[in-house]
Amino acid sequence: MPCRRAARKPSPPGASPPPRTRRSTAPRWSSASTEPLTRLGGGESRSGVTDGSVSAVFPTVREVLALDPVRHFAPRVVAGDAGLDRPVRWVHVAEVPDIATLLGGGELVLTTGIGLPGDDAGLRAFIGDLADVGVSGLVVELGRRYVSGVPRVMVAAAERRGLPLVELRRATPFVRITEAVHALIVDAQLTELRATEEIHQRFNDLSVEGADAAEVIRQAAELSGCPVVLENLSRQVLGYDPAGESAELLLDSWEQHSRRIRPTGRTAYDPDNGWLVTAVGARGQDWGRLLLRWPASGDVPGARSSDPAVGPPTRLTILIERAASTLALGRLIRRDAEGLERQIHRTLLTALLDHSRPVDEVALRAKALGVVLDRRHLVGVMVRHRVEDPVGESGPEAGQARLRDLSEAVGQALREAKLTALTSAVDDNSVGALLALTDPAAEDRALSAFAGALRRVRLDSAASRAASGGDMPRSTAGTESSAAPFAVDVHRNAAPGAVIVAAGSGVGSLREARRSLIEARQIAEAARRDRRDLPIFRLPHVGLAGLLHLLRDEPRLQTFVERELGALLEYDARHPREQLLDTLRAYLEQGRNKTAGAAAAHLSRPAFYERLARIARILDVDLDSVEASLSLHVALLALEAVRTP
């Protein structure tokens, strides 16, 4: 879909010169902006965009004829009406028949006709030469050579070539016309320079601020008023801004459409598909393309099939190149951080968890990235380390490195298991994944395949690091005596028991995916206190202890614990050698079997019975009551959950 454009109209008689702003809604650089310039002449511009066209920043023949200094001399178009929207790059006064050899195209030629050929063949050749070189039009003053009108042969030749031919029926000082038109052109060029300076300043600011790819793309679309798409080398969309157009239409079958866009240079315009394209990368390593939709020649006002191709204005070429440079620089700066694809995965997963983006937009962006979420069976998965800060790995840098390694392992495991998913770190401790399955019946099989692949990936990674000594503590690296035990420790930490894989309930729509992801996160958190080494934790594995662990920050649960056990906790605080709480725990964990409880507490039965009686008095409860014992047991489990970070 082409960029939004506003049609131009000639000024009425007596009106001031036409405004230079050619677009009603874009580009959005300043209130005095005009359509950008494009250099005339053959060949290619500095950016590789094919020239041979003039931009709509210049006044057209129609607008020149509407200027007061021109209207004063009673202009009349006698041929070439269809070419009146041709841009006028310059005004040239000529009185010689071979003037075409001195022109470059885009000029409006003024003449009195005194030097033109006197024969019909010469006049036809004169008109043909002007049309061949690409002049915008020919204006002839009547009165000196031609009195009542220009020769019919000139009119016929100009009409046949589509060249605007204009008579001035009053004596005309050409200097008044040239001054008026050149003032318009110079003013437009100054505005163009100001707009180009603003482009450079805007993207310099974005580079300094470390703006992310989404902001760079948004700024490029805002400045140009055109849809902008960033893709990787596999033609998957990394980011886009439709500039007010339909995102669905813009991204529909994007990969197939993108592969038809084949520019001829690093920065080039594909007129067949209407896209301005530039490579994105640095140091000889391109990693994507930035594309800006610009209307093909048929959409440009005044363009004719016989005219040279009207390419995008130079300003847009500068803009897309500066945007690409900003993206490449940002990627270099964040080289050690997660890749751009992973950033987008994280953005989409976070959007599902915190409702920061509409579900339809998440589905659309994920599809453009190659992850189809619509009409899929979705399963939320969370992977986290069982121990947050292992011995010898303290500090934020170590934590970030462990999380990054885990995120890479999860991504590789998904690829090995041939599963489609959004995946990235979702907080400081967890890596999330949203599996998209075509068959709901394959849920258990897919989760088992993922867990097995993750185990293999982590074991292989740990073994390679141990063999190279790359993860050795600095104090022990390089010594054989310390290397061997460290290698064993790495393998132990790489075992599946060192991480928890939790999966939520499968859901049938993206709108329910948040529930599955949150459930998986809660299961992973609760499973930290579970001593079992399960390949995958699901909701039935959590149990009462896991539920209480999830509710440990709930004030009502803490109030319940204080109400049930507060008196006993205060007693133990005053008598630290007795610790009656442990006696109560042994009694309840042994199913209220006093003999087994005494053995578990390493006490004689009389001493154990005496302690139970003391506990009953302190708490004012009947320990033989099933209901009272159940309440105390839940309170004990809740106390452990509250005390466990």
Image (cartoon, rainbow, N blue to C red):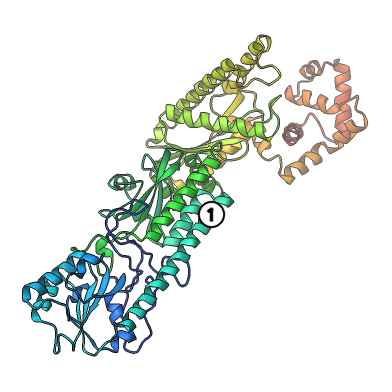
Determine which quarter of the picture holds residue 578.
Answer: top right
Residue 508 visible: no
Look at mark 1 in the image and give the residue it sits on: 204
Given residues 371 and 600, the one toward you in this image is 371
Q: Secondary structure at mark 1?
A: helix
Q: Amino acid at mark 1?
A: Asn
Q: Residue at x 39, y 74 (%)?
A: 20
When the figure is inspected, residue 307 is found, relative to residue 415, above or below; the finding is below
Q: Quadrant of the N terminus?
A: bottom left
Given residues 472 and 595, the one toward you in this image is 472
Task: State the image coordinates of residue 478 (x, y, percent, origin top left).
Answer: 65, 14
Q: Quadrant of the C terminus?
A: top right
When the figure is inspected, residue 304 is found, relative to residue 249, above or below; the finding is below
Task: State the image coordinates of residue 37 (x, y, percent, origin top left).
Answer: 37, 64
**Residue at the outermost left position:** 120
Task: State the image coordinates of residue 498 (x, y, percent, origin top left).
Answer: 61, 24
Q: Residue at x 30, y 65 (%)?
A: 54
Determine which quarter of the picture holds residue 546.
Answer: top right
Q: Residues within 10 Å of mark 1 (few under 14, many from 20)?
A: some
Task: State the image coordinates of residue 619 (x, y, percent, origin top left).
Answer: 85, 35
Horizontal side of residue 307 vs 539, given as left or right: left
Horizontal side of residue 175 vs 384, given as left or right: left
Given residues 344 and 480, the one toward you in this image is 480
Q: Residue at x 85, y 31 (%)?
A: 616
- The total number of labels drawn is 1
When the figure is inspected, residue 28 is found, relative to residue 209, above or below; the finding is below
When the figure is inspected, residue 153 is found, relative to residue 560, above or below; the finding is below
